[in-house]
Image (cartoon, rainbow, N blue to C red):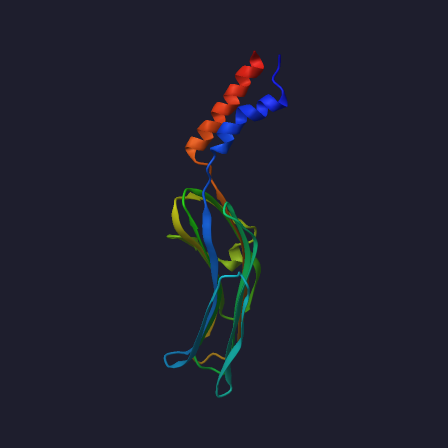
């Protein structure tokens, strides 16, 4: 006689009760914008803004402008994050970082750059799956402009030019127990050479999607397998 659904439930109740997954805690993020205006070789002006935000809110840095005579240097950056899920077994975070730089030079040598960045921190007491999807939202520039996307997980770091990234770049890995961090930075830079005038712009934005999910412990998987095997034997009788 084939076992009933009640028999199936009783067969699996013990191994399922023993399944243990990673406990994901301490999820938080740091959003920051960094910009610098620089007259080469003389230093002109710099600003730095750093914000810790444990509620995954947004950081929008107002436009910061410096004038040297008729020359104008400007940076504008922001970092926006949104947490879709934050439980003890699953973390799901979206974000967008934007770095912009603008320069209007009458002939002096300048360098202007801006960064919008986000760091996401989390802890896990056992191995966990991490998936990262990074993609370009928009890329543009005139004159001498450069845009680079920086991102990484723990000690692994990657750089890619905005003009070569189109489809999402996906990474999947497993991390061990401990504290971990993911970061994304949208970097924009413009510059002018001595004796060269003109207007230069660099506008770059990147997005990310990060998920962290628990991994069942091996002993729990063995218990589950034993329960399934036991049910199969009963069903075969």
Q: Quadrant of residue 173?
A: top left
Q: Residue at x 56, y 13 (%)?
A: 236
The image shows residue 118, relative to residue 87, as above or below, that is: below
Q: Check the image and name the residue furthest to the bottom.
A: 69
Q: Position of residue 43 (x, y in %)?
A: 38, 80
Q: Position of residue 88 (x, y in %)?
A: 50, 47
The image shows residue 196, relative to residue 162, as above or below, that is: below
Q: Position of residue 23 (x, y in %)?
A: 45, 45
Residue nearer the viewer, 76 or 183: 183
Q: Quadrant of the C terminus?
A: top right
Would residue 194 be found to the left or right of residue 65 on screen?
A: left
Residue 135 visible at all: no
Number of numbered discs = 0
Residue 229 visible at all: yes
Residue nearer the viewer, 182 or 3: 3
Q: Quadrant of residue 3?
A: top right
Q: Position of residue 131 (x, y in %)?
A: 50, 46
Residue nearer the viewer, 130 or 137: 130
Q: Quadrant of the N terminus?
A: top right
């Amino acid at each position: 006689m084939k076992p009933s659904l009640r028999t199936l439930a009783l067969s699996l109740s013990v191994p399922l009760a023993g399944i243990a997954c990673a406990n994901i805690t301490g999820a938080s993020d740091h959003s920051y914008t960094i910009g610098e205006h620089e007259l080469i070789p003389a230093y002109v002006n710099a600003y730095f803004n750093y914000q810790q935000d444990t509620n995954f809110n947004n950081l929008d840095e107002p436009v910061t402008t410096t004038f040297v005579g008729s020359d104008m240097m400007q940076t504008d950056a922001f970092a926006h994050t949104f947490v879709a899920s934050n439980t003890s077994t699953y973390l799901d975070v979206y974000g967008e970082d934007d770095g912009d730089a603008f320069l209007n030079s009458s002939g002096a040598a300048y360098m202007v750059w801006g960064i919008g960045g986000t760091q996401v921190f989390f802890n896990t007491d056992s191995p966990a799956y991490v998936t990262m999807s990074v993609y370009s939202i928009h890329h543009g520039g005139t004159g001498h402009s450069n845009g680079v996307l920086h991102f990484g997980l723990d000690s692994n770091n990657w750089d890619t030019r905005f003009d070569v990234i189109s489809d999402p770049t996906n990474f999947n890995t497993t991390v061990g127990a401990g504290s971990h961090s993911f970061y994304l930075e949208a970097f924009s830079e413009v510059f002018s050479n001595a004796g060269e005038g003109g207007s230069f712009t660099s506008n770059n934005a990147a997005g990310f999607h990060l998920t962290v999910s628990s991994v069942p412990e091996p002993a729990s998987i063995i218990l589950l397998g034993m329960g399934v095997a036991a049910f199969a034997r009963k069903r075969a009788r």
